[in-house]
Each structure stands twice: as C-alpha cells, then as structure tokens.
Amino acid sequence: MVCSTAMCPVSPVWPRKPNLCVWPRKPNLWAFWLLLLVLLLSWKSWAEKHFQSCRWLVVLNKFERVGALLSKDRFMDQEPMDTVTEVFQKLVDSPIDPREKYMGFPYYLKINFSCMGKNDEELVRKGHLMGLRPVILISYKYPVNFYRWKIENLQIQMEAAPLRSTGFCIAEVMCALNWYAPMPTKNGSVVMSVDIRSNGLGPYIPPKRFYVNINGFMKRDASGNPIFTIGYETFTLKSDHFKRSKSRPLWYTQNHSPVLILGGIEDEKTILLSDTNFQDFSLVELSIDSCWVGSYYCPILDFSATIHDAISTESTLFIRQNQLVYYFTGSYSALFDISHSSSSWVRVLASECIKKLCPVFVDGNGSEYILALTTGKNEGYIHIGTITDGRVSFKMMPESWSICDKLPGSNCSINWATYIADEKNLLLLVETLSPNLVKIFYLLNFNLETQRMDVLYVIPQFIPEVQDLDFLVLHGTETYTRTAMIPKGLFFNTFNNMLYIWGNFILQSYNRIHFIYLADFPKDSVIKYMVNSYQGDMAFVTEGEEIWYFLEGGYDVYRLVPSKGWDIYFSLQKLQHSFLFADQEFLVTLFYEDGQLYQLIYLVDPGYERLVKRVLPVAQLLLYDQNTPYAVATIGNFWTPSFTNLCPFKVMRLRDLPKKQHLARQELYHAPPPLVSESLGFHNNNTLAIYQGLVYYLLWLHSKYDKPYADPVHDPTWRWWEHKSRYKDYYFYLSSNWLAAEGVYIDMNSYQKLYNISHDHGLPEMVFLDKGTSFSFTVFLTAHEHTFKLSASSGSSYQVEKKLAVAVVVADPECLDVTVNQDVLLNRKAVLYKITIKDRKVCYDQGISGHNLKKTSLMVKVLGSSGKCFQTTYLGTRTQGHLMVPLLIGCPPGKRLAFDVTYTILHSQQLNKHYFDCVVSNAEMPCFLFRDLFQPFFLVQDMVTGDSGRFLGSYLLKVVGGGRTMDTIRDYTEEEIYRYNSPLDKTNSLIWKTKAERTTQDKKFYIMSQQSPGIEWLCLENSPCHDITPQSIFAPEFFLKLLVSNRGVDTSSYCDYQLIFILHLHGLPLSAQRSLFIVLVSSSLFVGLVVFYILFCLLWPHIVKAWVSLRWKINNIMAAESFYTYATSSAALSLQSQTVSEPSIKPPSNAGSRVDNALEKEVVA
C-alpha cells in the first residue's frame, strides 16, 4: 500500500536535492520502527482520551456477608438455601405465588471495576450516578454424563444491583459501593462462565469473562472455615518452587473441569490448584503417603516427592508420584450422589509400575478417560481409566496379549497414547530396538471392541531434507539429514481429524496414514508439550522454554518467544510499568482459554515476587515480528517511503450471519433486579434476597417445564404470571404511589425467556446441525489496488487474482456438503464469498437430544493470509484470514416431544361425541375413558427458538409400565412389553389394539402416525389392567406408562423423540367372572330382602298379638305382687302396736307402703 504525504502526515519525507539528505540505496529498518513508534504513541494518546484503562473485578460473597468490605468466599456450597422465605411472606399485593416455596442461593457476585491511576471508589460512585449497571451473562456448561442429565446450553442474563457497603462513612450519602447479583447454581453444571459488560452508560469498561466454578475439594472445619480435603493449603509461595522447576503441561478435560491442578514442583508433593482458571490459585500440599514400593519388576531407581503428572476431570483429580497413581473424587452433589465422593486419596493400580499418565482431552459416550502407561513386567499394556459420575474403573488393554508381542525387535516401550472415545480407538507411539540396534518408532492403532492392532505408520529414522520448502509430503523416497527423529508424543484433534506427532519435528496427517513434515520448526529444538485451542490454533513449548505457534490447516510455524516481536512487546510493556512483566521471568505453564493463549508465569522483581496469569498476544507479536517490505517513491521533489502490505486483503468481514443463538442452541433467560423506591436506587439486603428468590423460581420453572404433558402455552414462564397478569396495572399503581410492600416493584414483563437475540454478532463457538439442515454466511474481502487487473481474455471484465482466493475445508467431506459462490463488486473493489454448509444425512444414526454427537469442523482461510493479516482495534490486535468453527452433527440439544393433551381432549370430544373426566380431576393429568377411542397427538417443541408444531412423523407406541395407583406403577420386562403390545401375541395379554395396518418389519409392533385410527383399549385376561377391583363406589382406574419413539420408523430427523408419559384411564370394566359374582351376590341380597319383607308382613300381626298377651301377663304378675306386699304390711302394723312400750327391742322397718308410713308417723306423734 502506497501512502502519499497528504494521506500520511507522519511519514518522513526528504527533499530531492544533492546537498540535502538523500534516502540511501539500501536503507536500514530504523525508519520503519520510528514510524511504528510514532503511530503507537499517537494511538495511545487517542485511546487514553476516549477509553480509560479499566477492568472489571468480581468476587464471591456468601449470603450472610453481603455488603461487607474486603470479603471473598470460595465456591463450595452447592445446594439452594431457605433464606428468603421470611422476606417473601411480607410481599403482599405482589405478583408472586404465596403457595410456592422460594429459595435462595449460597452466593452473590460482588462486582466492581478499577481504572489504572484512578481512585476506584470515586470512579464507582461516578459511574453509578451516571447510570452504569453491570450486565451479567451466566453460561452453564452441560455435564459429561448425558445419560443422567439433560444436555442443554442454558444462559441467564441479569443486571447487578447497587448496594452501599456497611461500615463507617463520614458525611457522605454513599461511601464504598458495589454491585451485587445472585450467583445461581444448577443441577448438572459445575463449570460456569460469567460475562460482564456495561449497559452503555458511564465510563467504558471492556467486557470480560470470568470462570466461577464449584470447588468440590473443600469442606468446613469445626469453626466453619473452608479447608481442602486433598491436603493442606500453603500460604507461602517460594521462589524455589518455580526457579528450579521447568514449565509443565496443564492437563484437563476440555470445557468440563471445574478445578485445574498443576504439579511438577521439584521435590515437593505440592500442586497449584485453581477453580477460576488461574485467575487466583492455591498452593496445596497433598496428604498422600508417598510410600516407595520398589521391586524387581519396577525399574525406577530415583525416588522423588515431585508430582510428575496431574490431570483434572469433571469430578476427579489424578496424580502420579514416582510409579504410584492416586485419584480423589470431589464432593459434587450437583452431579451425583455424595456417597461417590472420596474422603482421602485412593491409590489405584497398586500392583503395576506406572511410568506415565496420558490425558484424554475430549470426553465421549457420557464418560471421561485417562490412560496409564506401564513398564516393567506389564510393558506393552495400557490401563484405560473410565470416570463416570465420580466412579473410577481401570481396564488393561489388550486383554489377552501384549502390544510388544506383535512387533519385531527388542526393548519395546509405549511412549505415548491417545484415545479417540467416539471411535473406541487407541493411537500408540511405540519404540523398539531393531536387531542392528537402531531405534524404530511405530504409530499403531488399537480398537477396543475388535481387539485388533494395525501399524499405521513407521516414523522415519532421520529428519528429511527440505531445501527451502515450507513443508514436505513424506512418501519414503525423499533424502534425509543425519539428525535423528526423536518422537515425544501424539496429539489428535477430534474436531478436524488432524493427527500430530511431535518431538524435534512436527508431522501432521489428515488420515493418520500419510504425513506432512513442517519445515519451519528447527530440528535442534525438542518439543516438551503442546496445547490446542480447538478453534484452529496450537502452541508448542520446547525443552528450552521456547514458545512456538501454529495455525491448523496451514504449514507455517512461528516462534513467539523469544523473537523480535516479543522483544518489542516486552519493551513497550516495561515502559508502561506493567505489573505483569518483570526482568526475570519463569514460565510455569501455557494454556488456551476461550481461544486466547495464556501464560502462567512467575515474576521476580527486587523485593516483589508473584505468580500471574497473562495473555500472550499472538497477533501482536506476529505483527511486530513482520519484516515489512518497503520501497521509495518519488512524489514531486520528495522521496517518500511506501510499505507493502503483506496481507492479500484490506478488510475482512463476515456478513449475512445466521442467528448465533439458534446455531449454538442456547436457551437464554432475562432476569433484571426488582425496582426499588429508594431515592438513589440503592438496594438493601431484603431486596437482594427477593432478587435471589425470583431468579431461583425462574430456574425452577425452567426445570419443571421439562415434563411429558405440554402446556397450553409454549413458554416456561407462562405459569408464573398465569393468574397474576390481570393485576399488572394494580401492582404498578402501588409502586408508583410508594405503597408497594418492602418498597419493591416486580415487573412481570421483564422475567422472560428470550428466543431471538439480534445484537449478538459473529459465528458461535459451536454449531449444531440436525439432519439435512444448513447454514450460510458471507465473507466480505476488500482488495488492494493491485489485486484487480484487466484481463485481456475477458475484455472489460475484471478478474481476481489467485492470491485473493478463499479455501473452505471440512473435516468430514462425506458428512458435509459445502458450496461457495463468488461475487465480485467492482465499484467497491471487493469480493463476496457466500459459503453454505449442509448436512448430507449419512453420518449419524438417530439419538436422544444431545447424545453422542458427531464431532467435525469447518475451516475457512484466505490463501496467503497466515501470520500476515491483522486487525487492530481499541480491544487489541487479532489475526484475520483464518476461521475454524467446530460442528456437532446429530440431534441438537433443546428439542423434545411432548404429549399435546389439550388437543387430544378436544379431538376426543369430536371423535367420541363426549368426554368424561375423573370425578376427582387433576389439571396436570386429565383422565380418559376406557370405552372411548384414544387418539393421541404430539408436539415437537424447540426450547431454543420457541417453535412448537405438530409431530407429523411415524412413531411406535408401547405400554412399558403400569399400576393401579401412581405409587404402584412398575416397569414391565421385555417379555411383558411384547405380550401387552404386539399384535402377534397369542397369550391373551393385549392391553390395546388399533386398526392401523402398518407394522414394523418383524410384525411385532404397530407403527402409528397422526392419520392412524384411534386406539381401542382391551385389557385382556392376562394383562395387568384386567379385572381391577374398585376401591370405592366409582369405576376402577388404572395408570399406564406409555413409551413413544420414532426411532427406526421416521427418518426425517436425527432425533429419537423418545417420550415416556403416564396415561390415567378410568371406567375400566370388570371381568365376566367378577361381574357374575357381583350379580349373584346382589341378586341373593335382593331376594333375601324381599323374602324377609314378606315374612315380616305376614308375621307382624301375630307378633303384635303375642306382644300384647305378654304385656297383659306381665301386668297381672305385677298386680299380684303388689297385693301380696299390702297384706304383709298390715300384719306387721298390728304386731307393732302391741309392743309400743318396748321401742328399743326392734326398730321400725324402712320398707312398706304409703299406708304403713302414715301409721308409723301417727305412732311417733
């Protein structure tokens, strides 16, 4: 690109006169660096004026420590807490359901920001008064075990609420200020990313991502303080830990490891541990026995306390010390039962001599894996460790023979292994010694299912001659140098099928058979380990701590550190007095995070030593490292230098992008804080507790929505406001007049699920493709002046030279179809490449949503742009011209089949001319009458896009369980399922039948569809729903467990829409025997009652007569008894009158008649 003096006023010019300074014939590069320095300084002054150097700060606070200054907590508590119930009970006249249980989360996010050279508290107060609010996006990583948990990409967007910190404040309305937001947890997720950006008001703060992961390797001591369960935390970081130790690889399961560990500290059984991707870290001394088991079969001579290998998975940590292997399973109640956790380090493979642990970076089949290489008596075998739900098991492979038995030579040793879980293949790097004492290295493939071993490649003995080539395809006929090839390890990228063999060379292969030698890597350097971003970037670290960079799909290898670009960048950072740089540095490890390359490095300054995590700006280093060609042009009387742009294009943009949310299958909820009536907009602990409860209830509705019965409205939040939306204006009136309870207004329209996000740009980090689906985008390239030229063969039309060509590469061309359409825009000197990617419907069988997806990738690159094209903005410098998008083929997450009970009931009314529900109705599970025809309808619901439509495909319907009540439902065996559902059954056990004529190929089951006739319920004699005894006066009921699946009968989708739901039948008939028995018993009772009535009517007069006679006789007897009593009383009175002078001889009788009593009274008188 040629710049004139008018366009580039800072460019140096020289007058074209002999007596003045004349540009030399072979000018040095000092002018270029002077110009670059001027440009950087001018850019720096402009950036400081418009964009302050600010950054977000985030820590965790426990629920009870909200508002405390300088408080920070570790993420170890995982269960929701009952801390907000009391506050919600006070929310009268609010759009909440008092019958529901609102819970809180253990932690809050405490958010602040800091600007270089500014007073932080003053800036925060200023930002708050200007309307600044941090916007938070929390993304939950789905778990490894998709058999236990539903696979979903869930996100929740919140807005942090301002809160004044507690403490002494002198005559100010607000002193220390922070923003707080709930930190919600979710079952099945232990890795969470927190993206923070501003709402566009106040100072500009670049967005930043934090990883806030659950640490399951901690517990609380007796005093409630957090401590590690794997060892003892050391708070003193010694420089000897890193000065004597060289850098080591960081091994973990990609995207699923919440805790990262790093060993390699010389003579210390200590590891570095971090649950924030080394944003902060802990130094932990492990509580292992460190015993030494020496024997004749384990030829290890030196003993060391060093942790040589350290690997972290989703729930388990693995370490190797000498020949001993230990693991520790963390306490993750969000993933599995707490009984799976370890209480101490567990030693495994105790009888084996383990020389190396090899990581498996990508999970597969719902599990994670680790490889242990043996030596000694079991040389030639590999132990494959499988981790599922925290349970660890090892299996030795091959099962009946050794790898070394199949290879010629002696001193056989497996030096490295990698496992491809989706293929169940082991790739092995094996070393042997030939009879003439020459080391031979083999690349082997071993299949775990077939137990077959194949020799894929024999690595050349020497490094080949390249003769100024960038790469060399190895056919076996090339010439070689005298430098021996020293293979050290393997790496296989499961997304682009690239295999790399590395050592003092780099070999890459697309098919694991033919290899390409990359000539840019020097043969005198030996690679120690490598890291991959799975987005098209790779980095290598050598034994001399050099850092090399490589773009997958290309052939150019670049040295980043040390390099000229590194020297320039380091000097500029030192001039800015950056605390991330020092004169003495020790590399600890190198790793990728979200596509960016990071260094964990130990810095030593006089009196100040520290361990920091910093970005290694690859694009900026490559830009500084360029040797830009230049020429001298004559403009008038002046010489003007012009610099040639090595990049083949000026501008590269992506246009016509599809919706990122839909491609990445992201479910997004929006949950802002409730509005408060405080004059300055500050929240308090009660309003933050309400915010917690609202977020919890929103996520609870999300989980509850995953049910077999479809709601009338396809939205998880519909039930929240179902009965409250009519009072929306009333709630707003209360808030507007300062009458709302607790001074809080809950806006019902704000808590919602977002289906179409338009402001999110760029291609997603991962794309999911269903059967036959496609997506497209356009690459827009602006060309240089010399790129367009007039072609004599085409008249006046312009042709684009080859150097502005775009290449599109797919990892699995048999699975994906790619079309590229070119459009040249002459007036804009631009070229458009419309790229369309479509699934070819051949590479995946049907599966459940998110299960066993096929991993592949798409790569787009502009030819000649590798390491030469850059884009510099206020956010930094990034490379251009290269793009890699991982693709997952199969049934994407977020799709499901639901029973459309609402339409089924309406159709049943039309089909049967009536509908009878149960006497005791249940809105969540309506009943269906046994004698009615049952024709079910189903919906295919997309939880990402919000689409919900009728399922029009074919399906199998089976009764797989049942019971008389919900509590007694049991699952049927395969034999029972056949007998109850198959039209071929001869045991008189069918539960249902249909007039549909279509069946499976083996005639065992009916194939149903929307057009099929209804189901007729049978419940024959040997079926479980036959002859149900009524439990009350109402007709018998039965609960059927139905399975609906389209697997094998509907090929319109990769999805196996497997749905299991409960159907409530009522009005079941009784069996003939029981009906006859009831009729006989009822008839007998009726006849007995009639006979009894007749007898009663006939005998009643006689009974009355007998009763009257009996009463007469009783009265006569009573009268006779009364006469006898009177006569006896008279005789006694006569005798008493004769002896009246002797009263003390016999006292008067108390018994007698009224006559006797009267006579007695007269005598006394």
Image: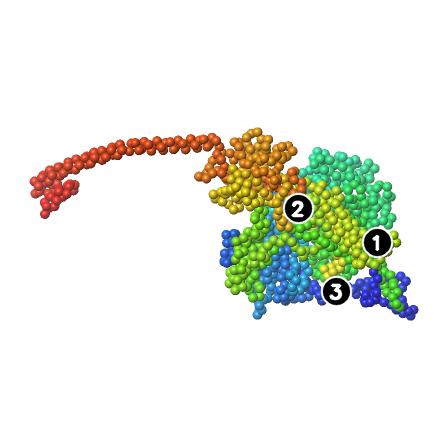
Residues packed near mark 3 inside 10 Å, few (<14), some (14 to 19) or many (20 plus)? few
Q: Earlier in the sequence, mark 1 or mark 2?
A: 1
- Asked whether 506 or 942 is in front, the reply is 942
Residues packed near mark 1 inside 10 Å, few (<14), some (14 to 19) or many (20 plus)? some
Image quadrant where residue 826 sits? bottom right
Which residue has dot 2 on it?
Answer: 892
- Residue 453 image point, x, y percent: 74, 36
- Tag 3, which secondary structure? helix
Residue 259 to residue 160: above or below: above
Judged by depth in the image, the label closer to the viewer, 3 or 1, is: 1
| Tag of residue 44 | 3
How far is disc 3 from disc 1 in space, using C-alphas?
A: 40 Å
Residue occupying the point 85% across, 56% down: 796
- Asked whether 485 or 1119 is in front, the reply is 1119
Which residue has dot 1 on it?
Answer: 799
- Tag 2, which secondary structure? loop
Q: Is residue 842 left or right of residue 914?
A: right
- Asked whether 969 or 552 is in front, the reply is 969
Residues packed near mark 2 inside 10 Å, few (<14), some (14 to 19) or many (20 plus)? many
| Tag of residue 495 | none
Residue occupying the point 47% across, 30% down: 1073
Q: Earlier in the sequence, mark 3 or mark 1?
A: 3
Q: Earlier in the sequence, mark 2 or mark 3?
A: 3
How far is disc 1 from disc 2 in space, using C-alphas?
A: 42 Å
Image quadrant where residue 1051 sits? top right
**Amino acid on which disc 3 is placed:** Lys
